[in-house]
Amino acid sequence: MKEKWEKLIELLNEMIELYSTILVLSKDKREALIEVKPQKLEAVTQQEELLIVKVGKLEASRGKIMREIAEACGVELEELTLSGMVELAGPNYSERLTKVADDFDRIMGELVVVNRLNAELIEQALGFINFNINVLAQSTTASTYAPQGQVPKGNDGRKLIDRRI
């Protein structure tokens, strides 16, 4: 059982490191959005995607170990939260698990705030782009009707973009 707790704590610490890096990248993404630097935004997003794939793999391993711990302790997997694990782990691991839980709470709290702000910045940028496209599309189209009520030649009434992307 000892090796399972050690492996779980090791995995959780690796996940915390990855989420910390994702947090830094999310802050970089915010700067790229504010400074309107699409190349930097793309690079940061690619790095984030790679880290998210790694987190997914660690999450699968964590789930497997937690199933094993739940089975060994006779507890339902759904009931096995970090706080529940602190109680089950005993004194040797409870302090380390408490620190892991605190680190997760702190990082995830920050990540939620930064991601919410990034989502708002992206919405604003999309609104600005949509506005500019509509302005450009309207300025390049001719009037709908000619002076005698006829549709002018070459005006098929199509817009560059109908709706918001």
Image (cartoon, grey):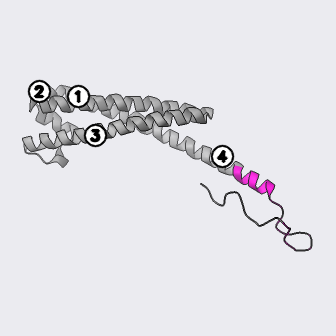
Residue 20 within the magenta-colored segment of the rendering? no
| Residue 42 x/y as whole percent | 54, 36
Distance between the alpha carbons at the discs numbered 4 and 2: 56 Å
How many numbered discs, if any? Answer: 4
Lower position in the chain sequence, tag 3 or tag 4: 3
Instruction: Tell me if mark 2 has few (under 14), some (14-19) or many (20+) residues whose alpha carbon lies within 10 angstroms of its own.
Output: few
Of residues 7 and 86, which is closer to you in this image? 7
Q: Residue at x 18, y 26 (%)?
A: 95
Q: What element carries label 2?
A: helix
Above-or-below relation of 146 to 116: below
Residue type at the position of mark 2: Pro
Residue at label 1? 10
**Circles 1 and 2: CB atoms closer than 8 Å:** no
Distance between the alpha carbons at the discs numbered 1 and 2: 17 Å
Residue at label 3? 59
Q: Nearer the viewer, mark 1 or mark 2?
A: 1
Q: Which of marks 4 and 2 is in front?
A: 4
Residue at label 4? 128
Quarter of the image holding residue 8? top left
> Magenta span covers which residues?
133-153
